[in-house]
Amino acid sequence: MKKKTIFGHWEASAIIMNLICTKIFLNFPRMAVEEGGTAAWIFAIYIAILAILGFTVIQKLYKPFEGKDLLDVAELAAGNIGRILVGFVILFCLGWGTVAYMRMFSENMKLISLTTSPLSYVELYFVVCLVTGAYFGIEALSRLHAFVVPVITVGFLLIMLGAVNYIDPGNLMPLLGNGLSAIFIKGAQKVSDYSEILVLFLLASFLKKYEVMKSTGYWSLVLASVFLVISVLVFSTVFPYPSSLEITIPIFHVARLIKLGRFFQRVESVFLFIWAASSLLYITVNFYLILFTFQKAFRLDYYKPLIIPLSIIVMSLSFLPSDFAEVVTYEVELFRSWSWVPAFVMPILLLILARRKHRKSAESGGNEPQDS
Amino acid sequence: MMSIGYIALIGLLLCIATYTASFGVWTWKRKNRFGAFMIFLVAVTVVALPVYILLFREA
Amino acid sequence: MKTTKPAVITRVIKMDRGKRLIAIIMLVAICPLLASCYDAREVDDLGFVIAMGLDRGKTNTLRMTLQIAKPMAGADGGGSGDDLPYEQFSVEAPAVFSGLNMINTFASKQISLTHLKVVVFSSELAREGLKPYLNAMLRGKEFRPNMPIVVARHTAEEYLQSVDPKLVTNAAKYYELVFQSYKYTGLIPKVEFHDFYLASKSPCRNPVAILGDAGKFLSAEEFDIKNSTYMDHHRSMPFEGDFFAGDIPALGGARAGNVGLAVFEGDKMVGELDGTNTTMYLLCTGDYIHSYWTFPDPLAEGRYVLMDVKQSRKPKHRVEFVDGKPRIDIMLNLEGDLVAVQSDIDYETGDNSLVLESAAEDYIKDHVQKFLDKTINEFQSDICGFGAYARAHFMTWAEWEAYNWHTKYKDATFNLTVNFKVRRPGLILRSGTSEAMESRRDDQ
């Protein structure tokens, strides 16, 4: 009998936190400043609250479906068609995340350190990681997250602390930045920055218990929000608006500034390490979940034969955008404006539908749901 | 005229596609038609997409 | 006799054929990694630029001067004593990176800017505007954000050529140390490229740069003070800060000198301030640390009281709007330690101490007021960044932008408060008059 993988709350929280927080090392602080101006920190807190509220609704609806992931719920709600359609949506979201982030990480790596290396050479390292991680499986990945994510967190906090000499709280004025409507109305759709919470609903089958899933969700969202807000606060106090809009890799620029005496300089090398670790973990987990979703949605017996073909497809897709700016445009203006729909709305609709169906079948003498 | 590197790469992709297609055939025999169709799609894409990017997109 | 094979070989032999093949393929695939990657560069193969100068070119847009560190110059016993620790290259080019390309054609090593310590612009270039070059420096990953920005009063090439460090053999260390002198002289501003760039684009303030020049005196006989600003400060003789770079009557050390600051409006230079005004600038921005000040003795004409003045607390700023015009309140909190009292007057305790403190406060207030008036009347440039305190009065960025602080600054008025306290008397607790002086006074 095949051993069922189960891991705990800390491993799952580390996975979700890393997935949400990796964008700190890319363009989240600048995106927050684009939305909120000098009130970027208010915007960051606002979308965190929205994400937590969204998760609160979802976790309440999830109670009867303990141990079932979103594909199982989709099958309960709409049969095979539902499972397949939801599978396609999840594959698209995860696929975009993997493809875009692989391209963005590689381009940024070329920008910072591997300037003369071809892009395919840089991406090859990511692909090797994808393939290795997929072969080892989710349990190994979760254990890896459990001890690497705290190291990444400490490195990130040290960089934030190191920039304290350059922080000017006056750069947070005027208080409302780009205005209330830009922050609270137009900015609401940027709750998509927390769309990686969708992964938690795929990991639900590995977490088994509803309480574990619930605590994982809250812990990871709260911690991720704290780090996202810290990154925005530090960035917008160090680089005043509107000059902060010009920065490509915000946290890298903050790390470059750190100079404590004549000895502690060039700290961006530490940033490179934690950034590479975070991005590799992000892409690897995403890729594993693509395989997992593919297998489950299409009822395949194994996913391992698809590792190499899908990794080649992912790498090829990452070459489709013609330049870095195009990827960033699609990521910020398209994906991060609409991914809240599959991340929050889709699970809510599926759960409501699945609950109603089960209530109907229970009334007509079918199986009782576990907990109403 | 394609370079030897490209030919080797396409050869490798064809091997991978063949292996993937064999998995698709196995899945088809186990009565999972739709799953097999998706696997065949992956097998085709694993050759078509890189070839398009290497040979046609550059031009 | 049976020989035992090593454990690794035994394991490989026991592997099945498939796994053995994979293991061999992986080992073979790893071997090319020993050749290092595309971006591998030996440190010894690179020429590290430690200073860059940009002037208006004669045959092209720019004349770029690069000082490239000599690798053995910093090492003990390396190089001869008379050799400079750097080599200077100049080229005329349309832009910074074009110039690097051109220098790479005749430099034996590939030029690297990763250890660039300072960028020097000529005042001619600074007055035309530095935007094209600042952009390149921000975008280029090799430029460090912490490097100082210097404006040479004549040409950057001449300034860099006059750098001849005597107390340090390592040229990079010279540049790292010399621009830290604001911490103990107060005669140059604290400027880093990152800050300069942000200020040039900011709606709240304008940037400044360090003013540098080659010392013009080659012997003590040539000393003169005709370029000193002591008369502007209503003095009978120059104090330490009453000069611009290059005008200090001094010999020895690296001939290049840094005193004063260049005032900018956006990316264009609009004027210069001497060392004394630079100290006032540091006081107003809160970057002042400590330095020796010369105060006229309030109770003995023609004598001076020297104090080591420190900032006891960061200055407090407040901006209010009166009829749409800014009123800026500044409170400076300083303390001084007596270093020398040229008269015998007992300033350490009692009423004299209060007289000295009051005289110091008036002196500082007078100089700071003159500095601030200059920024309004002569330069119309908010180099102290008071706009940053004004923006708290606005709710949104659009309102703040519409106010247009840079045009309103010239209508600003100042309300200055200086608190000065004499803290320590040095190693003399109470000044005493000599017997000869007493009897001379009695005779008179």
Image (spheres, coloured by chain):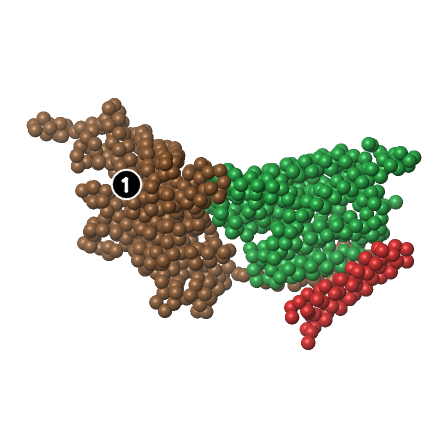
Chain colours: A green, B red, C brown
Considering every residue shown, the one lying at the far bottom of the view is B1
Q: Residue sitting at 28 percent across and 41 percent down?
A: C370
Percent position of residue C247, x then y: 25, 51
Tag 1 residue: C370
Q: Residue sitting at 43 percent across and 63 percent down?
A: C95
Q: How many marks?
A: 1
Query: Which residue occupies the foreground of this view, C426 or A80?
Result: A80
- Label 1, residues with CA under 10 Å away: few <14, some 14-19, many ≥20: some
Percent position of residue C54, x then y: 38, 60
User: Which of the 4 image quadrants contains residue C400?
Assistant: top left
Q: Residue sitting at 81 percent across and 64 percent down?
A: B18
- Quadrant of the rendering where the C terminus of chain C is positioned: top left
Image vertical order of residue C221 relative to residue C372, above or below: below
Is B55 left, or right, of C406 in this rendering? right
Is A159 left, or right, of C432 in this rendering? right
Query: Which residue occupies the foreground of this view, A173 or C178?
Result: A173
Considering every residue shown, the one lying at the far top of the view is C350
Percent position of residue A53, x then y: 68, 36
Q: Amino acid at mark 1?
A: Lys
Is A357 left, or right, of C224 in this rendering? right
Q: Residue sitting at 36 percent across and 43 percent down?
A: C409
Percent position of residue A355, x then y: 82, 37
Query: Which residue occupies the foreground of this view, C390 or A64?
Result: C390
Image vertical order of residue C314 relative to residue C240, above or below: above
User: Which of the 4 image quadrants contains residue A225?
Assistant: top right
